[in-house]
Amino acid sequence: MGATTTEPDVGEGRLAGMQPPALRADRPESHDSRQLIPWGVPDAVAVLATWLVSQLVIGLAISLVGVRVGDPFTAAMLLSVTPLVLILLTVGWVAAVASRSGGSHRLFGRRRATWRDVLAGLNYGIAGSVVITFVVGGGLQLLFRYLGVEVPPVQEQLRELATGPSAPVAAIAIVGLAPIGEELFFRGMLFQSLQKPLRFWPAATISGIVFGLIHFEPLVTVVTAILGVYLAWIFQRRGTLLVPIIAHSIFNLLGLVLIRLGLG
């Protein structure tokens, strides 16, 4: 995608009227800049493993008390709890690692967000949603069918959540909590930790694949992995996590609307 320039570092200001150096999306940040990130790949792996185990424990605990996990209200609550746990694990782990050396603020990017980033997130979200959902997703559906691979529709449980009485809770989880939790970990923590030893594209690809794999279904996994790379590119280009959070939220919102319309 060629060379891209970042926005001015609003949080740190300009020294002696000098503009901050341009950063390329296909190159890692400078050595000094990467050293400001106090956590590494092992930390990100530990958070991911802890999060996955916590989901199993929560599911088992719910089953033991006799509550059906498939119940729409219970499922909606789980959709809310899962990203909350990821948020707490990610922020807590980074804070603990950075307690001595500092640098915990780098979880949110290399500069402070501005109101222009809100507009940028909306633009990236709308453009990315259209291309990834309709062009990439539609093309993959045709390819999978041609190859004889069964492509399951959106889970019936998700359809029930989006259209049933638990829809408001599900919407908050899918459009609000999930983008925050997933961007904090997959872009803020995992992607940035991978950028310490790797260049941009390998780091974005690996973090995108991991992001896709947690969604399980074949088509959803591929589409989500592509979305993950796109969100990493946005994060690298803009320098603040707010932009991919908003873009991710728009993507999920479009998916929810399509489900409610019977098109998902």
Image (cartoon, rainbow, N blue to C red):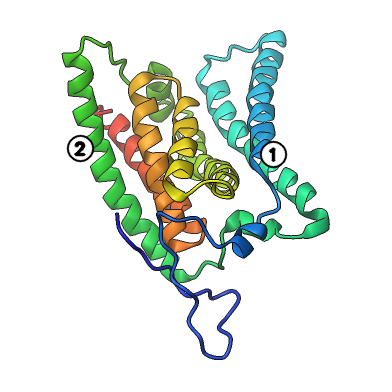
Residue drawn where x is 41% and y is 46% of the image: 201
Label 1 vs 2, first from the N-terminus: 1
**Element carrying mark 2:** helix
Q: Position of residue 151 (x, y in %)?
A: 28, 16
Q: Quadrant of the N terminus?
A: bottom left
Query: How far apart, in angstroms, are the residues tagged by discs 1 and 2?
Result: 36 Å
Residue drawn where x is 40% and y is 34% of the image: 225
Q: Quadrant of the C terminus?
A: top left
Q: Name the residue type under label 2.
A: Val
Q: Position of residue 259 (x, y in %)?
A: 31, 30
Query: Badge 2, how many Cα within 10 Å: few under 14, some, many 20+?
Result: few
**Element carrying mark 1:** helix
Q: Name the residue type under label 1.
A: Asp
Q: Which mark is residue 43?
A: 1
Q: Nearer the viewer, residue 215 or 207?
A: 207
Task: Indicate the quadrant where residue 175 lies.
Answer: top left
218 relative to 169 in the view: left or right:
left
Q: Nearer the viewer, residue 211 or 39?
A: 39
Residue drawn where x is 36% and y is 64% of the image: 4
Q: Position of residue 122 (x, y in %)?
A: 36, 57
Residue behind mark 2: 135
Extreme-right residue of the structure = 100
249 relative to 56 in the view: left or right:
left
Task: Indicate the quadrant where residue 251 lies.
Answer: top left
Residue drawn where x is 77% and y is 48% of the image: 97
Picture layout, residue 163 above or below residue 193: above
Q: Which mark is residue 149?
A: none
204 relative to 77 in the view: left or right:
left
